[in-house]
Amino acid sequence: MGQIERNKRLTWLQAFWVLSDAVAIVTGFALGYWTRFLSPLTAWIPASKGIPPLSLYLAGAAVTLLVWVPLFNAMGLYRLERGRTSHRPKDLVRGLLFGMVGVAALSFFYRGASFSRLAVPFIWLYSAVLILGLRAWVTGLVRRSSRVRPIRFAVVGESPIAATLVQSLRRSSYPHQFVGWFGVAAGATPPPASDRSGPGDAGPRLAPYLGPAGAIRDRAGELQLDLVILAPIEPEPELLRAVVEQCQELDLDFQFVPDLLPLWGRSVRVDEIEGLPVLRLRELPLSGWSGVVKRTVDLVVSTGLLLVLWPLFLIIAIAVKLDSSGPVFIRQDRMGRDRRPFPMLKFRSMRVDAETSSGPVWAQSNDPRRTRSGVFLRKWSLDELPQLWNVFVGQMSLVGPRPEREFFVQQFEGHVLDYRDRHRIKSGVTGWAQVHGLRGNVPIEERTRYDLYYIENWSLWLDLRILWMTLRAVVTHRGE
């Protein structure tokens, strides 16, 4: 299968996804129209303003198509997934929600026609169910029909990365068939899969062994190879050149995994300088307009909450003052963005002399240093409320890595890889690590891993999700 033929088949899969979405949207509008105006539902809720023409709703379906399809494309919902059989349902649901908001915004500016308020939720529900169902059906159909001639690939190298790639590609949207692996050195042994379940499980080993890398030219025709992936631990320039030359001669796709995984972790972007490929490590999504959006949300939400919650602030302040001697608020210097210290505010929940003998220590569950009011405040996370002021003045964000004191920061930076990257954005009142239960005295390496995931994968949707998970955790008493 030549490269043009392979690309054509992949393009057909994407085209089928677009077609299935279009069918789902039009059918959703038609079913919503029928449910509201022609189904038995009208016996309980009559259409008091009469039955509009079906053409009005079909026109609405056409407008929705013009909004949803480009939006889905921009959100990567037509991108072929390598390592997954299809897009995750939550990604599609998120696209549907944004699409619904986009159509609603357009309808606000156009008053020439109006849709039944009862029909709209039916239309969205039908469209959502049909899009999810048809996507799964189309993907399954294409995978079954493509098994006659899948993309046949081999890997070069003895690293665990090679085995992980094989496992992932077997789950791709378009079927990939693994035919074997080529060794880099004489006497090579098959690579085990990367450890994903625990230190004692090395994972399955690859088979069959196809010979050294220099045998690609001799065996490609016999194996009907379409793709070769080079993923050794330390690729030599001579090996890379030899594999590339063989693939070019045989019109094979060639892909290469560089040995940079310890440097970039999870996020990388390919850039270009005068035609030279450049890898940019740890791309930061919270820059430019994304940063403006996040700051706008922080300012609007913090302002609203401060105006609404001031009576609660007053009640808590009185309770803290009556419970024990000392200030109502505590101001602790914490490290924020760019390692700049700022005074983080909290309602005092511990005795004034809590750290007199011990020095700076992490708070613990059922901490004996808590006051009576502090037990209640920490259970419901009410001691954190004053940080809304830190958000309002721009020292913190609603969502981000939790800030630490300089005493702990200096310790962590010395032995935790990439800990400094936590300070590339503003600290948060809540964060991705906190909503996953990583609060208080837990391994800082684990918290750092979650914080870096948030930094590199930020989106407004992720912020809203974290805020919702935080509210749910507070309501279910999962505070510190």
Image (spheres, rainbow, N blue to C red):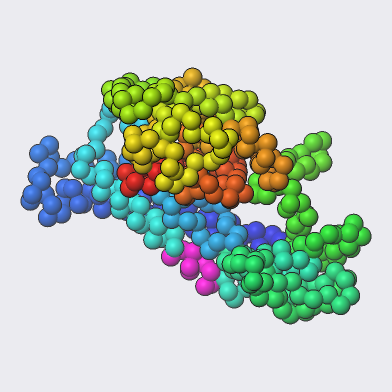
Q: State which quadrant residue 452 falls in.
A: top right
Quadrant in which the C terminus is drawn: top left
Q: Position of residue 353 (x, y in %)?
A: 48, 30
For the point 33% across and 47% down, which residue is it? 476
Q: State which quadrant residue 328 falls in.
A: top left
- The answer to whether residue 62 is magenta is no
Main secondary-structure element of the magenta-colored stretch: helix
For the point 34% across and 56% down, which residue is it? 129
For the point 79% across and 67% down, which residue is it? 157
The span shown in magenta is 137-145
Which of 266 and 57 lies nearest the eye of the viewer? 266
Q: How many tags in the picture?
A: 0
**Left or right: where 297 falls relative to 129:** right
Which of 174 and 398 lies nearest the eye of the viewer? 398
**Left or right: where 243 falls relative to 94:** right
Vertical placement of residue 406 versus 213, above or below: above
Residue 252 in view here? no
Which of 432 and 181 lies nearest the eye of the viewer? 432
Q: Position of residue 345 (x, y in %)?
A: 47, 26
For the point 67% across and 69% down, which residue is it? 193
